[in-house]
Amino acid sequence: MSQAVPLDRPRRLLDLEIDGRTTRAPEGATILDACRAEGVDTPTMCYAGNLTPVNACRVCMVEVEGSRVLVPACSRPVEDGMKVQTDTERVRHSRKLVMEFLASSVDTSLASTDWLRWMGEYGADPSRYGAAMEPMETGERDERWAGHHHDPDPTIAETVAQPVKVDNELYVRDYERCVLCYKCVEACGVDAQNTFAIAVAGRGFDARISTEFAVPLDESACVYCGNCIGVCPTGALMFKSEHDMRAEETWDEDAQTVTNTICPYCGVGCELEVHVQDNEIVKVSSPEDHSVTSGHLCIKGRFGFSYVQSRRGRDDRRPR
Amino acid sequence: MVGLATVFGAGGGTSSYEEVEHVDLMMLWGSNARAAHPIYFHHVLKGIHKGMRLIVVDPRRTESAEWGDLWLGLDVGTDIALSNTMAREIIVNDLHHRAFIELATTDFDDYVASVMDWTLERGAEVTGIPADVIREVAHAYAKADRAMICWTLGITEHHNAADNVLALINLGLLTGHVGTYGSGLNPLRGQNNVQGGGDMGAIPHHLTGFQEVENDVVRARFEQEWGSKINPKKGWHLSQMFEAMEEGELTALYVIGENPAASEADNQRTHKLLANLDILIVQDIFLTHTAEMADVVLPAANSAFESEGTVTNSERRVQRVRPALQPPGNARDDIWIIAQLAARLGHDWGDPSAHDVWEEVRRLSPMHAGMAWERLEELGGIQWPCPDDEHPGTTFLHGRLWSEDPAEQGRKAPFSVVLYEPPVDELDEDYPFRLTTGRRLDSYNTGVQTGEYTSPLRREETLDMSPEDAERLRLREGERVRVLSRRGEVVAPVRLALGLRPGLLFMTLHFPDQVDVNNLTIDAWDPKSGTAEFKATAVRVEKLEEPAVASGGGGGE
């Protein structure tokens, strides 16, 4: 069968140098792509393969010859003849400080194992900014207006500590774990779901993820696709099942299996990664590089699995 | 599936999801993909952000229509009128693809003759869409470099479903929008593995891989593989099966994973027919309404989470399904149950695995021959046809039509003459409202599966009505009303819906225990595909004399 196969514009291979080694990368690739192809370990937080880079976290910064400031590797395209340094004193210092600032104000303990490893490798010590301030009351941060700052107390570390928001049976919002990476905003917005239920409200340290006018979730535009959970790097957005099991200290990833299967609902054929512990589904995700989903699901695919388990006649742990 | 197979010889959507992101113009026709196929709509949204024009044809102004450049709110069941009017407008303005029509199609002259009296004025009168809008859409579709038509149950849940599909295919042939990257004709399958079920032969006239059961050569190959004789006559589709029950010709029914007692149109009749069977066997994961009526219930493992196998999606991608959970109690895998049944009937099939069954599919179905089990795993699924082990799968179909070598081109695609017929259930003074049905984002079919999870979006069944009609009938939001069709009646609360035009009502089929909408629907069905006309019921709405006493939950006054 003859078929016209669509070809992208041919892409040149560009020559560049990373840490003194010459390498080649295709036109349009980012410095991060080139680093990863070269096996150069580069810390990231706000980057995800299925989202547009937003340059929010500034963890992946590298030095580029001729550039006055450090540049974010995740979004900067490679150029012919570019000379990139990823391990200079300046780069290491910058990455360490960014990690410390993030981790001193935000609970990053549920971030990826890579993140925790990078913290160690870069010698980040968030505790040196003083004791953490007292957690705020529920909703207190949501009511702050831009410019209404209190005088800082230099002896304590400002944090975003606050109670977790549990307002529905599907997912929770634990904003003391939020590093404002913008991934959820992008997944809810033009990069995937296009529902625009959330955005960043406020300025400076008061900036936070918010629904429109900070209305409760069930009054917002949220359609509970959970694509924000899928991209959240720190556990700020989490399946309620995972949240409850962590609270009960029964969450055990070592005892979990992950099985890839196909969603049982409509005929689109979304690939599901089904996380199972003790023969119970505890959460559902989708592979970021799958051609059907790009890692994104709808409410039925992500949360609609209970019917399989309701046949078991036992659900002692989480009565419905 | 019938329409595409008739014209092109293969009953599958022509295009890949990825292509949707590179289309210039898409007509979403009788589909609310934003709610019913949310992840397909993600690809549509990527296309929109790259400049695609989306045109939504739907009686309701749906969530999908809100993303459209244009919304064509036609009257229910006038799709053929719209298609034929567009066709005439394209032809008289010389916008049709003469070279493609000459090269790759047949029966063009008959088609032209059949659409010539569909002037813009007549089309506008029948469909309710302004003439200049039909004109604009016809021109835009014909002139687009890459254009796609996608449809769902808004096209197929009608008494003339196959003709509706043929009417859309005609437009694709007329403009050459088929067989190239980014152009095509795509049904979005409403249920998981509808595509795969058809591909595997779970339709009356086909064996696996769209091979005709009434073809002696085909049947001989299957008989040799199976060591058994196959009935040389094609079988019945669902609606014919119910008719055969009525005639007493069908007396034993084996239902696997379906719930006809709840899902079929005109369900009082359905109940009676199921109850009259000599034996009803139901194999399901739940004790459904149908299973409650059964003589024997075979508890099955869930196909998505507890079984090994394959499904095929709307872009013809065969995908592996894997067991994540142990099935409860005595529930067993479908393949095991069927093999045991065969053994009891005197045929020893052993204990075949899903992989064994798949190898049999590959031996018998040329379009699946190249899909080794391991390759399905490696490639994340393969799109048929995939004839040999080196073949990467087929991203879009019918490129062959553009070939000037007759051997390579194969059978040309015929135009079909399709005549407009209004819905069977006619509106009159007693039944002046058109009731149509559809899905909500968080629910699915009769709610057997989706009723089990706690969706914050879920609300009870309502009779959705335009504010104009509600005012005319002096109804308030939340007020319970009686809805009557020529077959039955239900009571439901009114909900005001801005997406509905006066005269049009909407309900879902998700909550049969609360409001059994299939008491109202008509079982008029399409003779070619067997699909029932769920989308077009004539009803009237009556104010209840005494406001129903709120038994908790409702009220507020």
Image (cartoon, rainbow, N blue to C red):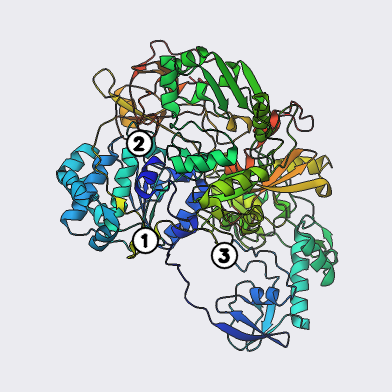
Residue B526 marker:
none
Determine if residue B192 is in view.
Answer: no
Q: Is residue B118 left or right of residue A71?
A: left
Query: Which image quarter: residue A199?
Result: bottom right
Q: What amino acid does circle 1 point to?
A: Ala
B331 or A220, nearer to the observer: B331
Q: Label 3 amino acid?
A: Thr
Quadrant of the image for the N terminus of chain B? Answer: top left
Q: Nearer the viewer, residue B122 or B383?
A: B383
Q: Which residue is mark 3?
A: A52
Whether callout 3 and callout 1 share a subunit is answered no
Compare residues B169 and B73 and report the one nearer the observer: B169
Dot 3: element: loop
Where residue B164 sits in the image (x, y, percent)? 32, 40
* Residue shown at the point (56%, 24%) measured from the top left: B254
Q: Are marks 3 and 1 in contact (CB under 8 Å)?
A: no
- Residue marked by disc 2: B161
Residues indicated by labels 2 and 1 sit on the same polypeptide chain? yes
Q: Residue at x 41, y 62 (%)?
A: B181
